[in-house]
Image (cartoon, helix red, strand yellow):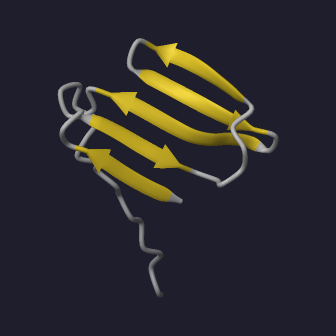
Amino acid sequence: MKIVYYEEDDTLFIELSKGEILRDESVSWNVNVGYTAEGIGEITILDAQKSGIYPLQIERVVADAA
């Protein structure tokens, strides 16, 4: 998985797999999903910071060691 933010364009690119993109689909005016033969390969989000998606807020849940 690779996540890249292009500040000059306010674009967030999330690569989930390296497979060849076979089909692109616009989910909304600023979100595009690229599909591989196995499923979602990449997600591109335009105006990511302006729309509140970037910076990412990632929660990590740690299992209790008890």
Q: Quadrant of residue 35?
A: top right
In the displayed structure, would residue 2 be above or below residue 29? Answer: below
Residue at screen point 58% across, 51% down: 16
Residue at screen point 47% across, 58% down: 2
Q: Quadrant of residue 36?
A: top right
For residue 19, side relative to residue 7 (left or right): right
Instruction: Where is residue 23? Give x, y as percent.
Output: 71, 26
Instruction: Where is residue 12? Give x, y as percent.
Output: 35, 40
User: Which of the pair 42/64 is nearer the observer?
Assistant: 42
In the displayed structure, would residue 26 be above or below residue 13? Answer: above
Instruction: Where is residue 46? Give x, y as percent.
Output: 33, 27
Question: Residue most toward the bottom?
Answer: 66
For residue 3, side relative to residue 27 (left or right): left
Badge count: 0
Question: Residue most toward the top?
Answer: 29
In the displayed structure, would residue 46 be above or below residue 59? Answer: above
Residue at screen point 30% across, 47% down: 5
Q: Quadrant of residue 54?
A: top left
User: Which of the pair 57/31 is nearer the observer?
Assistant: 31
For residue 20, side relative to residue 42 (left or right): right
For residue 16, side relative to residue 63 (left or right): right
